[in-house]
Amino acid sequence: MIYTVGHTLSYRKGLIESIPFQKLGRTSNYQGKFYPGGSVWQTSYAAYAYLWDTNQLDKYSVFAVDADWIMDTAPSLSGGAWHDLLVTSTIVQEVSAEECKCRI
């Protein structure tokens, strides 16, 4: 399991309405352009730390993604502190700060 951040209301809606609800992986042709893959973190704590550091906790939350850190991600092509998701993967559930034992 790895983790992503997403717009809280949109992702909650997606989890209810879209089966499966997925995070897009790297592709050479997303709307006619290269897409490096969605941003993912190895731990929910690291994802929450990113939201804290970027002052986005009011609109974004952390969600679990059914993927493997070693096999399904690569360092961010944009140089970010996250990895890029290489394969489209299912978003499983929201992860609260309490569940990851984050102090926010």
Image (cartoon, rainbow, N blue to C red):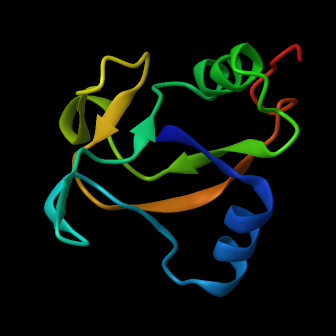
Left or right: where 5 falls relative to 85: right
Screen quadrant of the C terminus: top right
Which residue is situated farthest in the front direction here? Answer: 32
Q: Horizontal and vertical percent for residue 95?
A: 73, 43
Q: Residue at x 31, y 17 (%)?
A: 79
Q: Nearer the viewer, residue 56 or 25?
A: 56
Total label count? 0
Looking at the image, residue 29 sits to the left or right of residue 104; the answer is: left
> As displayed, is residue 17 above or below residue 91?
below
Name the residue at the left extreme. 28
Q: Residue at x 30, y 47 (%)?
A: 37
For residue 44, above or below residue 1: above
Residue 16 drawn at (x, y percent):
72, 80
Relative to residue 104, is residue 60 drawn left or right? Answer: left
Residue at point 74%, 75% (across, down): 13
Where residue 15 sits, quadrant-wise, is bottom right
In the image, what residue occupies the spot 39% across and 19% down?
A: 80
Indicate whether 58 appears above or below 97.
below
Q: Nearer the viewer, residue 27 or 68?
A: 27
Residue 5 lies, in percent from the top left, at 61, 42
How far across and how far down the image is residue 74, in percent? 22, 29
